[in-house]
């Protein structure tokens, strides 16, 4: 029994070795022709309307092996296209420092992507919160000429228009504020921003190719007829 088992193992080893030698020969032959350095071939679709299986020779294989419906590559999301949403709310609510204390500073930013601030609405009453300094847009320059009552944005309209530029989680909106006078209870800075949010698929900076003037089809800049979502 032992000898028979050893004989079978030897046959398996010889068969596997021959397969490896054949694969090596195939790689060398394919490589000499200037093609892929692997003898693997695309697996055909499993059924009508289903996409080809994953293999190293796939011309366009953005996912792991799957049997999903086949979608033409030009209809898939471009890796550098921009997803844009308008009138997106971004809220903040923070209690001011205790009466007589130092001013408070907070940072407001979206979870992901870029956020272009177009409006703001306040829910504080007059005489509660004094806004000392507003910074945004990646700059340390103040957006306000002097301190003002944050209730200036307390409007019956959906929001008050502002031009506070672009913010992100790396370049936030910075607000420095304090309570007016010495109230018995510190009030809240309570407001909501409204603006345009842009996010990008597979890119750190939404809209970068177009923003820096790259030619169409360069680094994901869409060609004519393939404009980004919301573009």
Image (spheres, grey):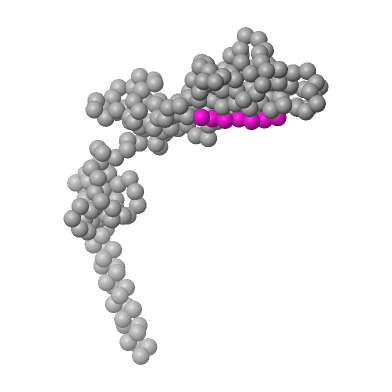
**Residue 93 magenta:** yes
Residue at far front of view: 156
Q: Is residue 137 left or right of residue 78?
A: right
Report x, y in % for residue 188.
69, 28
Choose between 108 and 201: the one closer to the eye.
Answer: 108
**38 in the magenta segment:** no
Q: Most extreme residue toward the bottom, as rendered? A: 1
Asked if one can make out residue 227 in the rendered structure from this viewpoint, the answer is: yes
- Residue closest to the eye, 162 or 84: 162
Residue 170 in view:
no
> Is the N terminus in the top left, top right, bottom left or bottom right quadrant?
bottom left
185, above or below 11, in the image: above
| Residue 121 x %, y % | 56, 23
Residue drawn 58% across the image and 14% down it: 143
Q: Nearer the viewer, residue 170 or 124?
A: 124
Q: Tally the numbered discs.
A: 0
Q: Which residues are magenta?
A: 89-95
Q: Position of residue 101 (x, y in %)?
A: 79, 24
Q: Relative to 77, does residue 179 appear above or below in the rendering? A: above
Q: Residue at x 35, y 28 (%)?
A: 230
Q: Is residue 56 left or right of residue 201?
A: left
Where, quadrant-wise, is the C terminus in this rendering? Answer: top left
Quadrant of the image occupied by residue 208: top left
The answer to whether residue 170 is above or below residue 11 is above
Residue plotted at (56% across, 19% down): 155
Q: Main secondary structure of the magenta part?
A: strand
Counting from the top left corner in percent of width and height, residue 152 is at: 61, 15
Foreground residue among 150 and 220: 150
* Residue 104 falls left or right of residue 172: right
């Amino acid at each position: 029994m032992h000898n028979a088992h050893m004989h079978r193992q030897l046959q398996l080893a010889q068969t596997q070795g021959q397969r490896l030698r054949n694969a090596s020969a195939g790689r060398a032959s394919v490589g000499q022709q200037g093609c892929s350095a692997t003898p693997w071939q695309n697996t055909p679709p499993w059924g009508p309307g289903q996409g080809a299986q994953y293999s190293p020779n796939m011309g366009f294989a953005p996912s792991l092996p799957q049997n999903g419906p086949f979608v033409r590559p030009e209809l898939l999301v471009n890796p550098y296209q921009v997803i844009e949403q308008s009138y997106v709310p971004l809220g903040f609510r923070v209690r001011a420092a205790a009466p007589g204390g130092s001013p408070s500073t907070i940072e407001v930013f979206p979870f992901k992507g870029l956020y272009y601030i177009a409006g703001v609405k306040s829910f504080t009453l007059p005489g509660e919160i004094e806004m000392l300094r507003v910074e945004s847009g990646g700059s340390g320059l103040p957006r306000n000429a002097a301190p003002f009552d944050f209730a200036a944005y307390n409007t019956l309209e959906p929001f008050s228009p502002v031009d506070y530029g672009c913010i992100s989680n790396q370049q936030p909106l910075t607000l420095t504020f304090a309570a007016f006078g010495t109230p018995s209870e510190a009030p809240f800075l309570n407001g909501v921003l409204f603006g345009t949010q842009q996010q990008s698929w597979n890119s750190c900076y939404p809209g970068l190719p177009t923003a820096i003037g790259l030619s169409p089809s360069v680094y994901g800049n869409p060609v004519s007829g393939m404009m980004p979502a919301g573009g």
